[in-house]
Image (cartoon, rainbow, N blue to C red):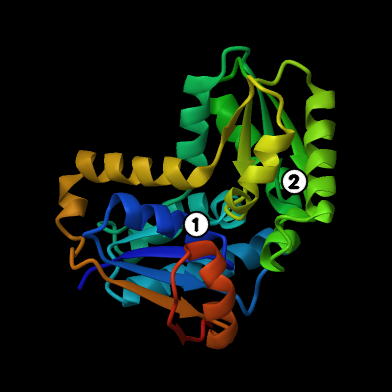
Amino acid sequence: MQPIGVFDSGYGGLTILKEFKKKMPVYDFIYLGDNARTPYGNRSFETIYKYTLQAVEYLFAQNCHLVIIACNTASAKALRTIQQKNLPKIDPNKRVLGVIRPTVEKVGELTKTNHIGILGTVGTVNSESYVIELNKIFPEIKVTQEACPMWVPLVENGETNNEGADYFIKKHIRALLDADKKIDTIILGCTHYPLLMNLIQKNIPSGIKVIAQNEISALSLIDYLNRHPEIDTECSKNSSVKFLTTDSTEIFNQRGQMFFNEKLVSEKIILD
């Protein structure tokens, strides 16, 4: 067994994994949620890098040849260092990929006005990772960001379809669009946000495109494996999924089901 590893600081990466399984049903996956130490957004660069590296090394030890960091904060603050500093020492044939670059590449194809908006967590917005990546690839694009600190708690507490959720979603969308009235494309820069899509779409004016990361990440992974058959041949294909958490399996199974839409059975592990 050589599954594809999928790592997130909590539950949001399950929306990415769900799309992977939908579009790549024969592949094997291991999902690791560092639920005992979530959220990552308010932690230092050094701590996020340390935690993410621990998770990547654990997944490598589980025979994963390829690991997807399905977490915007970890992708923003740890991915590049791990790719450049650690991978050459661990095993130059292994790969670690993130979710920010594929999203950025896609949004460049969609905007007509060259004005895009980012809705994300405080950690992702403060890291300016989307701004940096967009400026590298599409320097002509103007980027406006809006931090939405209440959106993740709304999702994780199952409050996605009430008046309170509608209020906070409307508030941040309005603030984003007031800051730049030329925005025609919005990136949902958090893997939790697809669970709020109905309310988000309800409050977005017609003509503005909303980009979620789950489908983009899956299509990007398929394209990557097509372009790198030497990596694809290392991935086992028995249609299996294994779930790991650093916290209570009972809580993970219950909350994770909201994100994955299937019954989950997880195993507790320790990262150190």
Q: On the rendered structure, is 99 left or right of 181?
A: left
**Vertical arrangement, residue 123 with respect to residue 247, above or below:** above
Residue 170: image location, x then y, percent: 81, 40
Q: How crowded is mark 1: few (under 14 residues within 10 Å), some or many (20 or more)?
A: many
Residue that appears at 73% across and 15% down: 182
Residue 233: image location, x then y, percent: 14, 56
Disc 1 vs disc 2: Cβ atoms closer than 8 Å? no
User: Foreground: 191 or 196?
Assistant: 196
Residue 271: image location, x then y, percent: 51, 81
Q: Distance between the residues labelled 1 and 2?
A: 23 Å
| Residue 96 appears in view | no
**Amino acid type indicated by mark 2:** Asn
Quadrant of the drawing holding the N terminus = bottom left
**Amino acid type indicated by mark 1:** Thr
Q: In which quarter of the image is residue 179?
A: top right
Q: Residues within 10 Å of mark 2 (few under 14, many from 20)?
A: some
Q: Quadrant of residue 135?
A: top right
User: Foreground: 58 or 148?
Assistant: 148
**Residue to which mark 1 is pinned:** 15
Residue that appears at 42% across and 76% down: 243
User: Foreground: 135 or 25?
Assistant: 25
Q: In which quarter of the image is residue 153?
A: bottom right
Residue that appears at 18% across and 63% down: 237
Of tags 1 and 2, the one toward the viewer is 1
Element under disc 2 = helix
**Residue to which mark 2 is pinned:** 126
Q: On the rendered structure, is 102 left or right of 202?
A: left
Element under disc 1 = helix
Query: Going from the N terminus, do you reach mark 1 or mark 2 first?
Result: 1
